Amino acid sequence: MAEVNGIPNDPARVAELDEKLKYIQETDPYEGFDYQAYPYVPEINWGGSHSHLAEMVCDIRPLLIIEVGSWTGESARNMAHELQGLGLTDSRIVCVDTWLGNVDCWTIHSGGHYPGLKMKNGHPTIYQQFLANTCYENMQQYIVPFPQTSEIAALFFRHFGFKADLIYIDGRHEFDFVYRDVTDYYKLLTEKGCLFGDDYFVGPVKAAVDQFAQEADLNVVVVENRYWHYECRYA
């Protein structure tokens, strides 16, 4: 049987998670989706394919991963491949994103919207690209999209009693949003869970991560001045 933190998964917890995930997606979000209508477009140099993400999965062997900020899904697919390689077939990654882009996508391009929004009929199609990329790599079993803001998603997780073994924060990069995300999602960790994230070199991200660490008496571990995690409680 697959393991979490070296301990065999509790069948009751697996069954409970499967039931709770139905509150997010009542039916298979990939069913009937014509992914071949979209090209395979992975991100380039955004850090989602870095080995650090796979290493975190390997170290913790989570049953549930929550990812805050997914875009077209490179980091989620990276972690999903690691789950598959470890034989963690019960594990799931819930990807929280609006798939509408951040404020820069709508403001910094004077000639129009950021091309990555892939506008169609007046609406971004990033979500469809996320689904397509997931299908191209055959990771549908592991990846559950949750089209929602991080704030409302955190309230949802708390309401239904979700607890995650690993949470990856890579959403909005302004101080207030990062601080809210790390504060809200740290509360959703299992007893031996770990919160980690990207872009520590971005000033507001570093400031928010460090401030919460000081307030919660946590140590911040930084890898390559980019990836960060609060010293994991499983260690």
Image (spheres, helix red, strand yellow):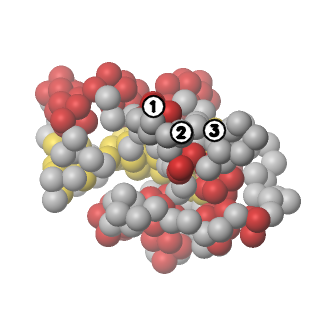
Asked whether residue 223 is in view, the answer is yes
Q: Which residue is mark 2?
A: 112
Q: Which residue is mark 3?
A: 147
- Residue 89 in which image quadrant: bottom right
Dot 3: few (<14), some (14–19), or many (≥20) neighbours within 10 Å?
A: some
Which secondary structure lies at badge 1?
Answer: helix
Residue located 69% across and 38% down the image: 123
The mark that comes first in sequence, 2 or 1, is 1
Q: With respect to residue 153, does 114 lie above or below?
A: below
Which secondary structure lies at badge 3?
Answer: strand
- In front of the other: 182 or 127: 127
Tag nearer the camera, 1 or 3: 1
Q: Which residue is mark 1?
A: 107
Give how far across and how far down residue 12 sits, in percent: 63, 50
Residue located 53% across and 40% down the image: 113
Tag nearer the camera, 2 or 1: 2
- In front of the other: 39 or 190: 39
- 200 on left or right of 176: left
- 92 on left or right of 221: right
